[in-house]
C-alpha cells in the first residue's frame, strides 16, 4: 500500500495535501510529478516576490502597476507636480505568497515516528487522535505522529494556494482538471493497519 505524505508547517499549524493538487500522496508520486504541489510550496516559501521578472504575478498587484503607469503617464504630461510612487509589492501580494518563509516545514508520512514534532499536546488530545486514526491494535497515544496531528488539528490551506495559482494563471488547464476529477484509486484512508 505505501506511505502517504503531507507537507506541514509546524509554526503556522497548516498543511498542503497532495491529493488536492491532483497528485499522488506517496513521496515519489508528487516528487516526480508535474509538481503543482511543489510549485505551491515554492510560492509559500518565497521571500521578496513581486520585485523582478519571473516572480508570480498576482492580479491585484498587476492592477496596482497599471495605476502607477497611468499616474506616471499623467505626470509626464505635466499634470502632476510630484512623481507617482511605485507600488509596494508587499501591499499587493496575496497573503499566501511567502506565508511560510522562514518557518519550520516537514514532509511527514502517515507511518512516521510517533511523538516526533508534536511536543506540547496533552495526553487526552493525543489519545483522542489515536482513537480516530489508528486501529484498535495500535490505538496508543505514543503512536500518534505529525501526520495524524496535522489531519486532526491543523488547517489544510491547499484550496487557498490552488486559488492563488489559478488566479495567477500558473497552473495548466489539464492540471486544473486533474485536481477537480481525482481518480477513485487515489483516495486514501487515514487509518493505519
Image: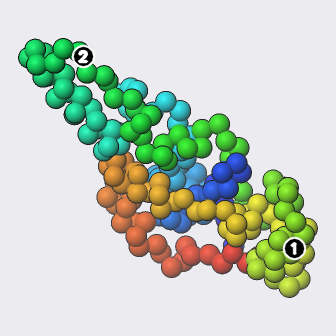
Residue 124, numbered label: 1
174 left or right of 129?
left
Please name the residue shown 41% across and 73% down the image. 181
Please name the residue shown 33% across and 38% down the image. 61
Along the line of sight, the residue nearer the viewer: 168 or 112: 168
Determine crowd level at label 1: few under 14, some 14-19, many 20+ residues with C-alpha closer than 10 A: few
Q: Position of residue 98 (x, y in %)?
A: 53, 40
Tell me: residue 169, above or below residue 21: above
Please name the residue shown 90% across and 75% down the image. 140
Q: Position of residue 82 (x, y in %)?
A: 23, 15
Quadrant including the C terminus: bottom right
Q: Which residue is mark 2?
A: 83
- For marks 2 and 1, the one nearer the N-term is 2
Tell me: residue 102, above or below residue 84: below
Secondary element at image label 2: loop
- Do the CB atoms of the residues marked 2 and 1 lie less than 8 Å apart? no
Tell me: residue 177, above or below residue 117: below
Amino acid at each position: 500500500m505505501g506511505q502517504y505524505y503531507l507537507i506541514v508547517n509546524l509554526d503556522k499549524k497548516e498543511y498542503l495535501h497532495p491529493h488536492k493538487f491532483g497528485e499522488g500522496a506517496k513521496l515519489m508520486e508528487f516528487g516526480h510529478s508535474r509538481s503543482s504541489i511543489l510549485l505551491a510550496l515554492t510560492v509559500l516559501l518565497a521571500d521578496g516576490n513581486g520585485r523582478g521578472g519571473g516572480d508570480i504575478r498576482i492580479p491585484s498587484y498587476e492592477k496596482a502597476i497599471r495605476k502607477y503607469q497611468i499616474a506616471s503617464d499623467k505626470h509626464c504630461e505635466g499634470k502632476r507636480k510630484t512623481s507617482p510612487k511605485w507600488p509596494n509589492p508587499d501591499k499587493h501580494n496575496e497573503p499566501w505568497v511567502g506565508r511560510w518563509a522562514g518557518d519550520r516545514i516537514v514532509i511527514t508520512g502517515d507511518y512516521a515516528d510517533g511523538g516526533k514534532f508534536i511536543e506540547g499536546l496533552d495526553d487526552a488530545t493525543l489519545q483522542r487522535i489515536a482513537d480516530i486514526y489508528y486501529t484498535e491494535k495500535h490505538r496508543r497515544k505514543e503512536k500518534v505522529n505529525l501526520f495524524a496531528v496535522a489531519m486532526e488539528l491543523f488547517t489544510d490551506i491547499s484550496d487557498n494556494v490552488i486559488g492563488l495559482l489559478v488566479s495567477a494563471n500558473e497552473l495548466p488547464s489539464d492540471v486544473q482538471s486533474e485536481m477537480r476529477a481525482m481518480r477513485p484509486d487515489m483516495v486514501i484512508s487515514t487509518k493505519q493497519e
